[in-house]
């Protein structure tokens, strides 16, 4: 009985219920929600925000809030593409991914080093990093759209995992091969956070840094790992985005920060740290993708889609504010 009660009190339950209600509503209105092409479109739409959500999830569980990931991903992606084009790259596409990840790790480690050394607020540090990345992109690199990307990346962009055609919708659908990158990353982060010592240490640091230090956790190492790994995911996401778009645009991640953060919070990750689940992150991401994509099936104008997305962001940030307020009250009561 207690187990059932616990399920009803979790954010994941209400997010899943909202997705189900929304799915049924859209299906009744359009009759096209459960078509194969729409399901594949939703899965495709989850790839980039889902990967960035995993990055934000790790940071948020540790008690921080990273806002640098959109431009960390953009700078990693853009730097990789201009470097590969400069050498007329025709080798293995894995090199492109590894190079982008390396750029991301460097940016993430800079965040981690500052936070570890000076214990500055994560939001302030990552906000500064975001501005620096923007400055490098548009000031130093003079970033602009690169429509022609190296051939190995183009080849991967054309590779599909699933192709389908819906007679009901009279539309074709496909799921790109890079969905496997998203799937493997999700499984890896779940294993890391739930089955490894470093994952348990991240939860402990998010719960109470002082207590974590007292029980022997190397907090400085944990911080460096968190932000280095978050940077790795940002770099990986950047190159994945290039493959999905079959082009490289420096503004491709613009405005994605609040959407991703709200999705993670709606999925049940506490902004105060120490709690959260991969399932919740995926559910929160799916909810945003459904609102953003599937409302088109009902012929709802774009401005109303923006309205609903705005409501979800307000809801997500409202939950975060409530969590902080409740934690402060408990602290005073204690």
Image (cartoon, rainbow, N blue to C red):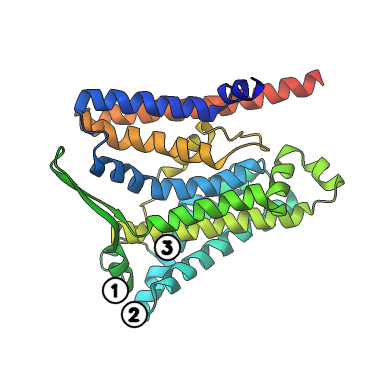
Task: Name the residue beneath numbered marker 1.
Answer: 151
Residue 295 picture quarter: top left
Location of residue 169 in the rendering, given as x and y in whole percent from the top left corner: 16, 38
Circle 3/circle 1 CB separation < 8 Å: no
Residue at (61% x, 46% y) in the render: 59
Q: Give SS at disc 1.
A: helix
| Whether residue 18 can be seen here | yes
- Name the mark nearer the viewer: 3 or 1: 1
Residue 142 picture quarter: bottom left
Residue occupying the far front of the picture: 1
Residue at (36% x, 52% y) in the render: 251
Q: Residues within 10 Å of mark 1 (few under 14, many from 20)?
A: some
Circle 1/circle 2 CB separation < 8 Å: yes
Which mark is drawn over residue 90?
2
Residue at (64% x, 41% y) in the render: 61
Q: Give SS at disc 3.
A: helix
Q: Quadrant of the C terminus?
A: top right
Residue at (46% x, 36% y) in the render: 283
From mark 3 to mark 2, how far is it between C-alphas? 17 Å
Location of residue 210 in the rendering, given as x and y in whole percent from the top left corner: 82, 42
Residue 34 picture quarter: top left
Q: Give SS at disc 2.
A: loop
Which mark is drawn over residue 77?
3
Q: Of 105 and 178, which appears nearest the observer?
A: 178
């Amino acid at each position: 009985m207690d187990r059932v009660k616990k399920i009803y009190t979790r954010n994941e339950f209400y997010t899943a219920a909202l997705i189900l209600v929304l799915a049924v509503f859209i299906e009744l209105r359009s009759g096209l929600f459960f078509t194969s092409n729409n399901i594949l479109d939703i899965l495709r739409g989850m790839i980039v925000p889902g990967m960035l959500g995993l990055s934000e999830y790790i940071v948020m569980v540790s008690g921080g809030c990273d806002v640098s990931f959109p431009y960390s991903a953009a700078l990693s992606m853009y730097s990789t593409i201009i470097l590969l084009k400069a050498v007329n790259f025709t080798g293995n596409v894995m090199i492109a991914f590894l190079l982008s990840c390396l750029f991301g790790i460097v940016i993430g480690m800079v965040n981690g080093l500052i936070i570890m050394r000076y214990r500055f607020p994560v939001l302030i540090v990552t906000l500064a990093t975001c501005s620096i990345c923007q400055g490098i992109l548009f000031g130093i690199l003079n970033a602009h759209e690169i429509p022609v990307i190296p051939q190995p990346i183009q080849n991967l962009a054309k590779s599909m995992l699933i192709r389908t055609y819906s007679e009901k919708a009279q539309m074709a659908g496909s799921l790109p091969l890079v969905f496997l990158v998203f799937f493997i990353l999700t499984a890896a982060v779940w294993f890391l956070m739930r089955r490894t010592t470093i994952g348990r240490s991240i939860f402990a640091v998010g719960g109470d840094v002082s207590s974590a230090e007292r029980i022997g956790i190397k907090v400085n190492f944990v911080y460096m790992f968190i932000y280095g790994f978050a940077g790795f995911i940002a770099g990986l996401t950047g190159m994945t985005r290039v493959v999905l778009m079959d082009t490289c645009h420096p503004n491709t991640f613009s405005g994605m920060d609040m959407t991703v953060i709200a999705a993670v919070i709606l999925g049940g990750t506490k902004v105060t740290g120490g709690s959260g689940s991969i399932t919740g992150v995926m559910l929160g991401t799916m909810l945003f993708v459904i609102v953003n994509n599937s409302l088109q099936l009902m012929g709802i104008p774009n401005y109303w889609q923006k309205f609903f997305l705005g409501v979800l962001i307000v809801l997500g940030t409202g939950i975060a504010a409530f969590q902080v307020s409740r934690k402060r009250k408990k602290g005073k009561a204690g």
